[in-house]
Each structure stands twice: as C-alpha cells, then as structure tokens.
Amino acid sequence: MATLTPVGTKRPHEDMARTPPMREAKIPKALPKYGLNEWKELGANITGIIPALPENLVETLKLPCACGHKTLAEHSVFVLVPGELDNEYFTLKKLIAFAKEHFETAITCRAMKRLPDQAKKENETHWILMSRCLLPNSRESGYRYKPPKISPPFAYPTPIEAALCMALFSSSAPGFFKREPSYTTLTRCEDGRKKKTAVGGFDPKWQTVQVQTAQAEHANYGIAPVVRF
Ligand SMILES: [Zn+2]
C-alpha cells in the first residue's frame, strides 16, 4: 500500500528533482519575464517545489488584456512568484527587504502591521501573468464601493504579486498603467480583508512602489488582474 503524505505536511525537497526542466524557449521574446534564471542571477535560492512553465501559457497569452485592447502577451508581465526563499516563507516583509537589497525599485509599506501576513496562503511558488493595464472603469471605484467580481481565469493580485511585478517592471519599458493619466495609479489586491490593500503609486523619479491601505474615497484605485497558474 502506498504511503500518503499527510495533508498540510511540507513536501520533501526531493520533489524538486522530479520537477520537469524549464522550457524557457517557449516564452515569446517580447513578453517581459522574470523566471527562475533571473532569480538565480540575483543569487536568490527558491526552495520547495518549483513549477514548470504553465502548459496553457501560449493559449492564455492570446486572451484579450483587461483593458479591452490587445492581448495579454502585449500588455502583461510574466513572473515566477516565490513561495519560499532559503526554506522560509516569502512574505511581504521579506519581499520588501529583498527589493531593498536587490532591485532598483524599492517597495514601501505604511502600516505593515495592519496588513495580513500572507505566508500561509502564499507559500507555493507559482507563475502569474499580471496585466499592466486596469479593468475599464475600475479606477473610479474606490474601496467604499463593492469591488467588481472578476471572472476566471482572471483574479485580483495579492499584495506580494502586485508589489513584486511593479518593482521589477515599473521603472523600465513597457512599465505599468501607461494608459492611465497619473503615476499615482494603484491596483486593489486580494488580501482577505475586502480588498482594502492597494499597490502601485510609483513614480519613476522616486523609484518606489507603495503598498498601502486604500482610502475610502480615492480616485486612483483601479484593478489590474492576474492570471495565476
Ligand atoms: Zn491592456
């Protein structure tokens, strides 16, 4: 009889050896990408199970962008979001510290204590496509209004996903929210508390990405969805 690993038990790292090799060549060249090779170049040691490239990536890239124009391939970034670095959960706090040390763009967070610790929920290393555009009309919603539902395969980004993608790509072409009139645009995030966390607001001059608690009335909060593989 086969021995089953109990639910909730951390899977042994031997699993890494069975992870199929990355097929980086399948990714379209124009798609801004941050994958395993890029993390390795920074000396980041992603531990735990590292997923192969999503099999449906090419099909997914043909979907229309959130903004209603073009395709995801033209308006997204493709990022490997670590669940663990050096056998420790990759929390928002860890991301902020990592960005300070390794990225050109810093991540700032006011009221860190009030933000949920995503460690338990986000401990799987996974690929995402994050839209660089907002859902049409989502910008005016403010958090006082009920956030619009998003249909699969699209979902709200988590604060870690949004902050990571923006820190990696906001200060370089093609950037984020280029169709929006202001640099202070933010996306609301799935945070387990009515999507009150907002991420964005970067300014190329300051080279920072802000993670903040969304204010009740603020015109700059939109929704940049992700496809999470
Ligand atoms: Zn778009």
Image (cartoon, rainbow, N blue to C red):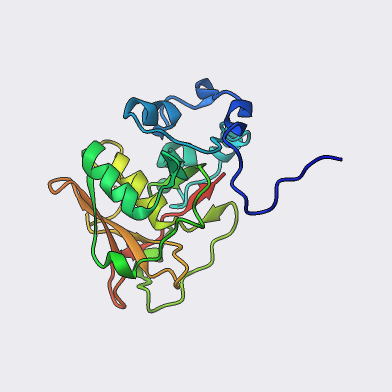
Residue pictured at 38% horizontal, 27% vertical: 40
Q: Residue farthest to the right?
A: 1
* Residue 161 vertical placement versus 144 (above, below): above
Side of 192 where 4 appears, left or right: right
Residue shown at 60%/38% (left/top)?
A: 12
Q: In this picture, is 99 found above or below 21?
A: below
Residue at left offset 27%, top offset 43%: 99
Is any part of residue 74 visible from this angle?
yes
Q: Is residue 140 left or right of residue 130?
A: left
Q: Position of residue 81 (x, y in %)?
A: 44, 43
| Foreground of the two, 114 or 191 | 114
Q: Position of residue 191 (x, y in %)?
A: 44, 64
Indicate the position of residue 56 as horizontal and vertical percent values: 62, 36
Q: Does 42 appear above or below 171? A: above
- Residue at 14% over, 49% down: 206
Q: Position of residue 150 (x, y in %)?
A: 54, 61
* Number of marks present in the image shown: 0
Q: Is residue 213 in view?
A: no
Q: Quadrant of the N terminus?
A: top right
Looking at this view, name the residue that lies furthest to the left. Answer: 205
Give the quarter of the image for residue 39: top left
Query: Dividing the image into 4 quarters, which one contains the C terminus?
Result: top right
Closer to the camera in the image, 221 or 48: 48
